[in-house]
Amino acid sequence: MSPKKAVENIEHAVGKFLASLRQRNASANTITAYSKDLAKFKGYVAEKYAGQLSAMDHVAIRGFLSHLYESGLSKPSVARTLAAVRSLYRWLGREKYVQHNPAALVATPRLPKKLPRVPTIEEMNAIFEPNINVEEKAAFPNRDRLIFELLYGCGVRNSELVGIDLGDIHFSNEVILVRGKGRKERLVPFGAAAKDALMIYLKDRQQILSAKKKSTPALLINLRAGRLTTRSVGRIVKSLAVAGGLSPDIHPHTLRHAFGTHMLEEGADLRAIQELLGHERLSTTQRYTQLSVKHMMQVYDQTHPRSK
């Protein structure tokens, strides 16, 4: 088999793998991440092994990881890339392209166990109070307030947030139909504060659509009447959070973590939190018990006279 044909084969295999993810309704973010990570693998296999997957054993894959480290990738990035390669080989095995998964014999890089820094309930409440710094930073104040209300008040993912259409909001039942990972649907309740923010924002939304002579099913739009993107939401959250006195490393998922942590601290059942967040496994939700214990230890250390 010539090198050219071999490279075509690996590209064909990766292309078919990504196509299978789309057929299984994997999220756009998941497909993009796999594409980027497997592009590194394709390039390495093409350069070092003429694109022949049959030449790749666990030693060769360890060499690939070494190459990633030498390229300056961090441990988390290398671990993520290895996970993508493992997934590729599992699919190749199911499709009878390979008999073994050499990536399964390669150890995942050890990562430091760091819990995300979650804002306190008091810090989150301060964001929603009138604040001249926050208002000056907001390009579209009523929309941006709604973004915070839905991320923190409903615990939705960034990708779920921008995917919400106006028709997904059921005002009579005060729930939102959310499409999560794998296009799985769930109903998420929203409270009085989010409802108020929705009603105020919808008037602004209609004014923009009328002025631009456009229509869109999207709930959240930009000033050009287009659907808001996850990148834009990330910028908005970071900018307004910093203006409100929160850490500069905050991002939309931080507010989702805060939702789960604060509900647990206030006595919510772990199974209920799992349903609200759309976690497939309870073990994913159980991370919030660690965050809650961390918070309790901080309170103890700061307040108990015998903790010093």
Image: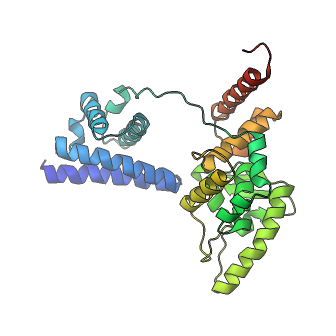
Q: Nearer the viewer, residue 254 or 268?
A: 254
Q: Position of residue 195 (x, y in %)?
A: 83, 61
Above or below 177: residue 118? above
Q: Please identify the quadrant where the C terminus is shown.
A: top right
Q: How many marks?
A: 0
Q: Position of residue 1 (x, y in %)?
A: 13, 47
Describe residue 185's horizontal placement relative to residue 303 as left or right. left
Q: Residue at x 72, y 69 (%)?
A: 166
Q: Position of residue 119 (x, y in %)?
A: 69, 41
Q: Residue at x 15, y 53 (%)?
A: 4
Q: Position of residue 275 (x, y in %)?
A: 73, 42
Locate residue 183: give its quadrant. Answer: bottom right
Describe residue 119's horizontal placement relative to residue 113 as left or right. right
Locate residue 193: give its quadrant. Answer: bottom right
Residue furthest to the top in view is 306
Q: Residue at x 38, y 51 (%)?
A: 36
Q: Nearer the viewer, residue 120 or 46?
A: 120
Above or below 153: residue 216? below
Describe residue 105's horizontal placement relative to residue 142 as left or right. left
Figure colour scheme: rainbow
Q: Residue at x 30, y 44 (%)?
A: 41
Q: Is residue 1 visible?
A: yes
Q: Nearer the viewer, residue 77 or 99?
A: 77
Q: Is residue 272 visible?
A: no
Above or below 285: residue 160? below
